[in-house]
Image: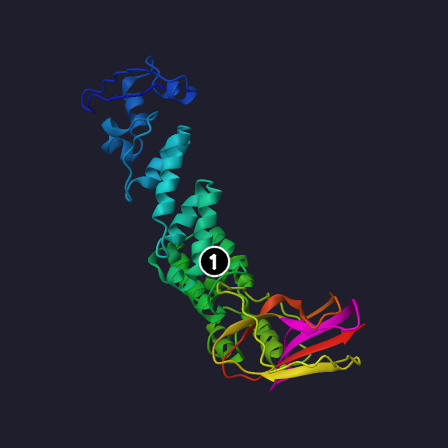
Amino acid sequence: MPHLVDVFKAPKELQIELIELSEDDILKSLFDAKKDPIEIWKNAIEYPYLRQHAREIFLYSDEVQIGPETVMTTLYTAKKYAVPALEAHCVEFLKKNLRADNAFMLLTQARLFDEPQLASLCLENIDKNTSDAINAEGFTDIDLDTLMAVLERDTLGIREIRLFNAVVRWAEAECQRQQLQLTPENKRKVLGKALSLIRFPLMTIEEFAAGPAQSGILTDREVVSLFLHFTVNPKPRVEFIDRPRCCLRGKECSINRFQQVESRWGYSGTSDRIRFTVNRRIFVVGFGLYGSIHGPTDYQVNIQIIHTDSNTILGQNDTGFSCDGSSNTFRVMFKEPVEILPNVNYTACATLKV
């Protein structure tokens, strides 16, 4: 493979020794011997990494020295001059050094340089380490599009109130970048459509009342609408997403508290209910329901999880399932996992129709 080796003698002399030129049109253009040597030098050392390590860069070699301080500049250079081997080397370096405290910075760069695989890895890291990632210094430096790409995700592992507080920090930093006063109106202005991606309905009424409702970022109409959502049944529609963020990383467990099950049950069209509590936060993904023991049967079913004290429906699904006539349970799932908090009374409800 052709090499460009020891191209520059010295900046002072502005002499270029062209040892061997690739057929690549971009490199031909850059190192055209007919060009003014000063112009060639300026083009070639446009980037600090090339300027500092000109003798060490071998554009068509499999060996390159990359470090944390130089990798992004090298990646930019590799893309500009179409050197895929060097580009791949840089991306691999970034993957190996991806951590929660630099995930947002690398995500911004991955989007800038159109590296979807690296961007996907960054997003997965943020999903798994959301709290650490948003508390890292680089979070407030990201651009609005990157912020929105993260807020759109259903898989962030963090409570919505903490996410809101982090977004407010970002808005304050963005106001400073745009030289705007730190007013609630300006924070809302710089957030733009990102504000609609905060899932306020997922907060508790106490969290909402102590934070977002008093922030000044929401309009009076939005605050009233959300308070009604928290307190009134049936719940009125709100402008904000109420879909849970499915931050599920643990293994799925099936819980059965019955000591024995007799094969003598039936369904009359009324609801079957079980009240339960947990001692730590979990997500319920579905129920195991019994079917007919007299042969295969198809059922229509409505399943719900209800907050017992307020009689609020936290999650439900109208669906169907088929049993095979055995005494086994059959999985019936919610569309989205339902968050269950410790030491709170809940009711699991199932209504079956043949």
Residue 15 position, x and y percent, is: 23, 18
Tell me the quadrant of the picture where the N terminus can be found. top left
Q: What's the residue at 57%, 84% (across, down)?
A: 345
Element on which disc 1 rests: helix
Crowding at mark 1 (Cα within 10 Å: few <14, some 14-19, many 20+): some
Establish if 1 lies above or below 247.
above
Whether residue 248 appears in this view of the structure is yes
Residue 124 position, x and y percent, is: 46, 54
Q: Is residue 291 magenta?
A: yes
The front one of 219 and 330 is 330
Establish if 224 lies above or below 81.
below
Q: What are the residue bounds of the magenta stretch?
A: 287-316
Establish if 6 lies above or below 117.
above
**What is the total number of numbered labels drawn onto the structure image?**
1
Tell me the quadrant of the picture where the C terminus can be found. bottom right
Q: Which residue does the numbered mark 1 point to in the structure image?
A: 190
Residue 274 position, x and y percent, is: 64, 83
Amino acid residing under circle 1: Val
* The quarter of the displayed image where residue 299 is located: bottom right
- Main SS, magenta region, reads strand
